[in-house]
Image (spheres, rainbow, N blue to C red):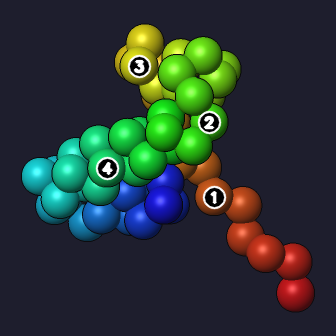
Amino acid sequence: MLTLTCATNLAGDYAAALALDTDTLGRSERVLGPEHPAIVAALAGERGNCDVDPMPL
């Protein structure tokens, strides 16, 4: 879902990107728990990794 959020943000639809990001964070927190390092980092405002490596051919 992070890839979709990044693509939406890059397309300039910032409101939709924020909504996707908020929804994804909420779902991830319910599944992983509030103490998971990825959740802690996201809540601290650390940048999500939007760098996408192309798949090898």
Residue 7 left/right relative to 57: left
Q: SS for tag 4?
A: helix
* Horizontal and vertical percent position of residue 16: 17, 59
Q: Residue furthest right?
A: 57
Q: In percent of the image, x 60 and y 16: which residue is there?
A: 35
Dot 3: few (<14), some (14–19), or many (≥20) neighbours within 10 Å? Answer: few
Amino acid marked by disc 4:
Asp
Query: Which dot, 3 or 1, sits closer to the camera?
Result: 3
Q: What is the spatial separation of the Cα atoms under label 1 and label 2, in whole angstroms?
A: 23 Å
Compared to 30, does 1 lie above or below? below
* Horizontal and vertical percent position of residue 27: 44, 47
Q: What is the spatial separation of the Cα atoms under label 3 and label 1, in whole angstroms?
A: 22 Å
Amino acid marked by disc 1:
Val
Q: Quadrant of the C terminus?
A: bottom right
Q: Which numbered disc flags the more N-terminal residue, 3 or 1?
A: 3
Q: Which numbered disc flags the more N-terminal residue, 4 or 3?
A: 4
Compared to 10, does 34 lie above or below? above
Q: Which numbered disc flags the more N-terminal residue, 2 or 4?
A: 4
Q: In percent of the image, x 41 and y 40: which residue is there?
A: 25
* Residue placed under numbered mark 4 in the picture: 23
Q: Which mark is residue 43?
A: 3
Q: Which numbered disc flags the more N-terminal residue, 2 or 3?
A: 2
Q: Which mark is residue 32?
A: 2
Query: Which dot, 2 or 4, sits closer to the camera?
Result: 2
